[in-house]
Amino acid sequence: MSGRGRLAFCAALATLAASCALLPLVDPATWLLQAAMLIALQSGVGAAARRVPLARPVTVLVQALATLLLLTVMFARQEALGGVLPNPAVFERFADLLTAGTQDVGRFAIPAPVTDGIRLMLVGGVLVIGLLVDALAVTYRSAAPAGLPLLALYSVAAGLSQGGARWLWFLCAAGGYLLLLLAEGRERLSQWGRLFADRSRPGSAPHEPGSVGGPAVAPVRTGRRIGALALGISLVVPAVLPSLSGGLLDAARNGGAGKGGDNGGTISAVNPLVALQDSLNQPEDRTALTYRTNAKETQELYMRIVALDKFDGSAWKPSERRITSVPSPLPSPRGLAPDVRTQKVRSKIKAADWYAQDWLPMPYPADRVSVGGKWRFEPEGRTLVGYQGQTTRGASYDVESLIVEPTADQLRQAPEPPAGLKREYTKVPDSLPSVVPETAQRLTRGADNDYERAVRLQDWFARKGGFRYDTQVQAGSGTAAIANFLEQKEGFCIHFSFAMASMARTLGIPARVAVGFTPGTAQGDGSMAVGLQDAHAWPELYFEGVGWTRFEPTPTRGSTPDYALPDSPDPGDNPEERLPDRGQSASPSPSPSQSEKCTPEEKRANPDCGAAAPPPDSGDRGGGFPTGTVAAAASAVLLVLLLPALPLLWRRRSRARRLRPPPPAGAPPEVVSGSVLAVWSELLDTGWDYGVVPEESATPRTAAARIARVGELGPAETEAAHRVALAVEQVLYAPRPSPDLASGLADEVRRVHAGLHAAAPRRLRLRALLLPPSTIRVVWGVSRRWAALRSRWAGAVRLRFAK
């Protein structure tokens, strides 16, 4: 196999290795075999085009057309002309599949099934990355920048993956990139003659005075250093970008685990609402949890998963909190006074084998939890969260919890909450539309305390405001979605809970949103079954002496607590119109509840027959301006654009520093000498950028002559280079250099630079601008400093132990 053939093979292998990072996201992994076959064909087309040979842009275009034909045959054969040639119908088919794939990504939890839409997104994305890698590494023979599309592919996968083996996929991607760099280095090295020692590298012997920078290093060693730099960037990028909550460093940041270390760590701000609406509209109600309890009544046994306590304008989400080992018993609930009546109940809960949730569903507030596996406790929200891949899949656990039964008078007379808590839980974004606080003020006008204000808000949403429960309304948790909901008065539990919590905060009432399940449906054997359609969201408001207190603003869903019922019914209210809780009664009954009597057709036609389940992970879907997402995407784009520009920026900075104005008259000789040598370094690096590699054995005069000859300089530029060389000889050999020796030398170097630029072909000019070879000095400088630091520390350690 030729050198280019090996390089093309390594480029395809590197793309497939990086694509392995996508394997945990979907199931099954058969799509990767299809992608491998298409990558091989794409690479073969490129090899044939280069062998003709075709111009480089034409080669890339031929590969792109071949990729389009391959995707057409695989995904749109029925619409294509002759089953192969694309036409407008083919592109419409692609658009439909991509739209369906985008919806499937939001609908399914990880690992998602490989639908046609998701398969097109995966295979097509890998082919696009493969085309970029092949074009950069093989067609344009620049393997180092080919790491950027590979890095983008890995970063997307690392940001979405939740598995505990992400380091394995990183090693696959990194190994493929290093193999690509090594193949390019070998291919280039095979075209060189004998490779002389480079004494300008760290640890080498002193060089001749006129060589300053020395020749370029061997491509293999340069490739290794570039590879190490790129891999370092791939470690840092997922750690610093806010949109990537995972990445290889996530475990290290969190104390050695994905969510937290053995004794602590943090839980990231993840929103668990990504597919709630899709679950609400599913006709089949799959059982997620079953439990038995000694509670006499089950209407208060909401299976709470997590509390969303941060509202940034684009979404409600959990704050990033410290997590600890699970204590036994759990700390006393915050704000709960001894004089408030409570009941202690015990529940034995079993999660279905298919239900994988990062948070542990349990009644609130839990007092003691007995569960196996890797779980940690988040004190503020009183939730248990899994780490190192731990989920609820098939988990069995026992929970002792409290049923808090405050009276209306206790809530009405609740004192002012602590200042810190009130400050944190009454924050609202500046983007919150004015209609939200204005409506809250109008509805609660005349109320004497926070309890009465909360009950009025709840009653307005649930009964008097004319709201309609509808799962077909577009989901969203941003400020714009809340305003639209108040205007249109149609939505489901997300809209009701987010709107009431936001309005309560504007009234100075601490509020957050809880996500979980309603108590479920009684079964004939005395157990309770909690299905996907029991999933729910509800607001929790804080009252000092009682703690976080559940309210129920969503009509036809859940049950309104006794303490939250209005003092007197509205004259127009009919108690019989209030729907009972789904299957909840004082004693379990084998007979189905009203919602269970709904046929699948009725459930599809009437959303009130069912409700939803939050999947294990999340994100906001619509509603409000996605400030965080846009900022993260902008940061990522800026970073991707900045990385290729780093050599250009460094080179301009070093040129400006070296060619700054000469020292004033009367400056010390060492200052003048330093200025002259800096100008000489810039002249040599300028020649290097335009293909004149410095020779360490050359004198200044010989080096200047070589730049003029190889760079095809004109007479004026040649004379300028020699004037700089003569000034360097004075600095190096004259007893006392002239005080004004540096004057005008910067202009001479600029003249030489202009001459080299004018004489160079376009390709060489682009390389000198975007990827100047002299920037390798950055790597040398870092290597020298690291070697010096390592030597100094080693000496200090030896000296310490020698004592």
Image (spheres, rainbow, N blue to C red):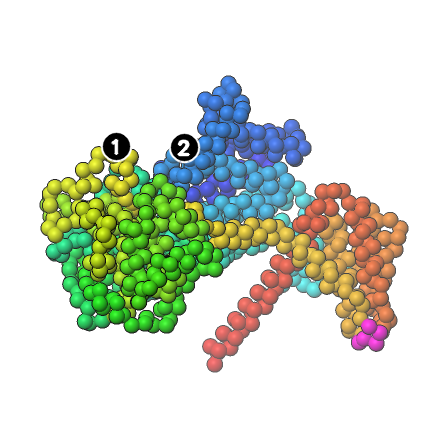
Residue 339 lies, with reference to residue 72, above or below; the image says: below
Q: Is residue 454 left or right of residue 688?
A: left
| Residue drawn at the location 69% of the way across and 51% of the way down | 772
Q: Is residue 665 inside the magenta stretch?
A: yes
Judged by depth in the image, the label closer to the viewer, 1 or 2, is: 1
Q: Which mark is residue 116?
A: 2
Residue in the foreground of this view, choosing between 709 and 303: 303
Q: Position of residue 793 (x, y in %)?
A: 53, 71
Q: Which mark is residue 601?
A: 1
| Residue drawn at the location 82% of the way across and 47% of the way down | 712
Along the polypeptide, which appears first: circle 1 or circle 2? 2
| Residue drawn at the location 48% of the way across and 60% of the way down | 430
Residue in the foreground of this view, choosing between 88 and 717: 88
> Most prominent secondary structure in the magenta stretch?
loop
Q: Read off the magenta span.
A: 664-668
Few, some or many residues within 10 Å of mark 2 (<14, 14–19, 20+): some
Q: Position of residue 611 (x, y in %)?
A: 28, 44
Q: Is residue 534 visible?
A: yes
- SS at circle 2: helix
Of all residues shown, which one is farthest toward the front? Answer: 571
- Amino acid type at circle 1 is Glu
- Amino acid type at circle 2 is Asp
Q: Are marks 1 and 2 in contact (CB under 8 Å)?
A: no
Q: Is residue 33 visible?
A: no
Q: Position of residue 344 (x, y in %)?
A: 15, 63
What whole-number distance in Å separates the C-alpha atoms at marks 1 and 2? 27 Å
- SS at circle 1: helix
Residue in the foreground of this view, choosing between 247 and 2: 247
